[in-house]
Amino acid sequence: LLAGSGLIEVDFSNPEDRALFTTASKVFSFLMVILQAILYIISGAFGRVTFGVSILLFAQLLAAGFIIMMLDELVQKGWGIGSGISLFIVAGITQRIWWSSLSLIPVGDGKRYGAILAFFEAILRREPVWSWFHRVGGWPDMIGLITTIAVFAFVIYVEGMRVELPVSHSMFRGYRGKMPIKLLYVSNIPVILAYALFANIQMAGQIIWSRWNMDNSNFWLNLIGVYNQTSRGPVPIGGLVYYITSPGRLDNVMKDPIRALVYACIVVAICIVFSMTWIEIGGLAPERMADQLLSSGMQVPGFRRSRKPIVNLLNRYIPTITVIGGMIVGLIAAVSEFFGVFGSGMGALLAVSILYQYYQTIVQEQVEDLYPFLRGALR
């Protein structure tokens, strides 16, 4: 973030700068693992535990974070494609989808956990048609599976929507190409940041409630979050935390549609804000893109090869596409929660965008081998 926003200067062509940047990233990542582990334990995510158990939990979380960092570095060192973290995310989402579809474990409604198996069990038992598709209790069902397929198909379709600007190379007159500006210009970053923000607010609200407001008597602290203690832990029933927590499946949405509407509006609004913020701090603003285009020797036919006209051209598209893209990913993430999408709507966005990035990485390497002079533009 600091490098992309220009707050710190990093020359990635300089081996010393690149090594220092990599080391700093690892140190900050490990510090974040320590901080998140402490916050999870303090917030009561694992229930009320003794000091000894807290130490064991902290050590376990720390070890898990360290292992993930090492595996990610292993992939980045050349023993794989792309980012190890992205690979872990896709693997986790895939596991949840398969588990929700085909798990053999029996659950509370007398059927298997997997939606497909429960569907056939309901047919064999000659249950009402509605119960073939919908299960009481929040278990995976065919509505969730069908919606999962629909969401994946929609995300794949939207991922391919783009505005293409013609470009040519200033030195190689015969080369013509197109610069794509995707509809999901900032990809899944806004929804990741939005849900990370929600998770931290929820964690902070739970800590504040468990320390100073367990009787829900403080008006000001109630604005942050009002909780009800259950056997599964504190459950938000009011305040800001209540409205940034997903209401869950359609049953709960129908019970409190106002909450569902407010939740969806908040998710969409936050995603739009993060979209606009990310293009500035992530190096995706029109000014940065114009500089990158010119430095690689590319130009837009019909425009002078200078910064200002290209920036003006990009300003016609990038801000509008950024807002629309943020709105789309926010709606997908929120609505998917209501229909019980396997792996969540954010999971579908992450899986499709990550797999598409892997595809682009493979294609990019092939293009760079064929046209070495394009390496600067593609990077």
Image (cartoon, rainbow, N blue to C red):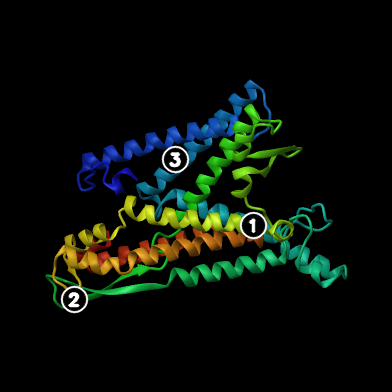
Give the x, y percent position of residue 130: 80, 70
Q: State the mark number for residue 301.
A: 2
Q: Which of marks 2 and 3 is in front?
A: 2
**Residue type of the residue flagged with mark 1:** Ala
Q: What residue did someone put label 3 on?
A: 69
CB within 8 Å, label 1 to label 2:
no
**Residue type of the residue flagged with mark 2:** Pro
Name the residue at the front extreme: 219
Q: State the mark number for residue 325.
A: none
CB within 8 Å, label 2 to label 3:
no
Q: How crowded is mark 3: few (under 14 residues within 10 Å), some or many (20 or more)?
A: some
Question: Does residue 101 appear to the left or right of 39 in the view shown?
Answer: right
Alpha carbon distance from label 1 to label 2: 48 Å
Q: How many labels does the image show?
A: 3
Alpha carbon distance from label 1 to label 3: 36 Å
Q: What element carries label 3?
A: helix
